[in-house]
Amino acid sequence: MVKMKRGRPTIRLQIQRHIIEILAEVGVPMTISSLAKKISVKMQRTISWNTVEKYMQELVKLEQIKAIQLPHSKVENTIGLTVYTIKK
């Protein structure tokens, strides 16, 4: 007999769910800091961009989210921002 877990979902699951919801709603690639601000508003508490980055990397490994590395705007042949979008 397998016991079902009760109570509130973990912070990890809440944040990952919010990441996917926000990216689906917006429809455009977003940075981690933009996501952290939107998640903080939804959860009504401050969420660090480090936390969002950690859970974002897990979603990238699970192939639910796609990371897009943009070229640097001023320095040629270097990587600039990384933006994230829902994997299609």
Image (tube, rainbow, N blue to C red):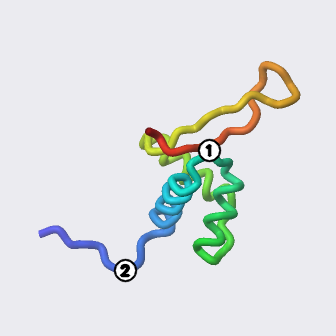
Few, some or many residues within 10 Å of mark 1 (<14, 14–19, 20+): some
Rendered position, 35 above or below 2: above
Q: Position of residue 85 (x, y in %)?
A: 55, 44
Where, by quadrant of the figure, is residue 48 drawn?
Answer: bottom right
Closer-to-camera residue (29/48): 29
Q: Amino acid at mark 1?
A: Pro
Per the image, the residue denoted by label 2 is 7
> Residue 47 vs residue 19: left or right?
right
Q: Position of residue 23 (x, y in %)?
A: 55, 53
Dot 2: element: loop
Q: Residue at x 61, y 65 (%)?
A: 39
Per the image, the residue denoted by label 1 is 29
- Extreme-top residue of the structure: 77
Q: Quadrant of the N terminus?
A: bottom left
Sequence-wise, which precedes: disc 1 or disc 2? 2
Closer-to-camera residue (57/3): 57
Q: Quadrant of the C terminus?
A: top left
- Extreme-bottom residue of the structure: 7
Q: Position of residue 64 (x, y in %)?
A: 44, 44
Q: Position of residue 81 (x, y in %)?
A: 73, 38
Dot 1: element: loop
Q: Residue at x 42, y 43 (%)?
A: 62
Q: Amino acid at mark 2?
A: Gly
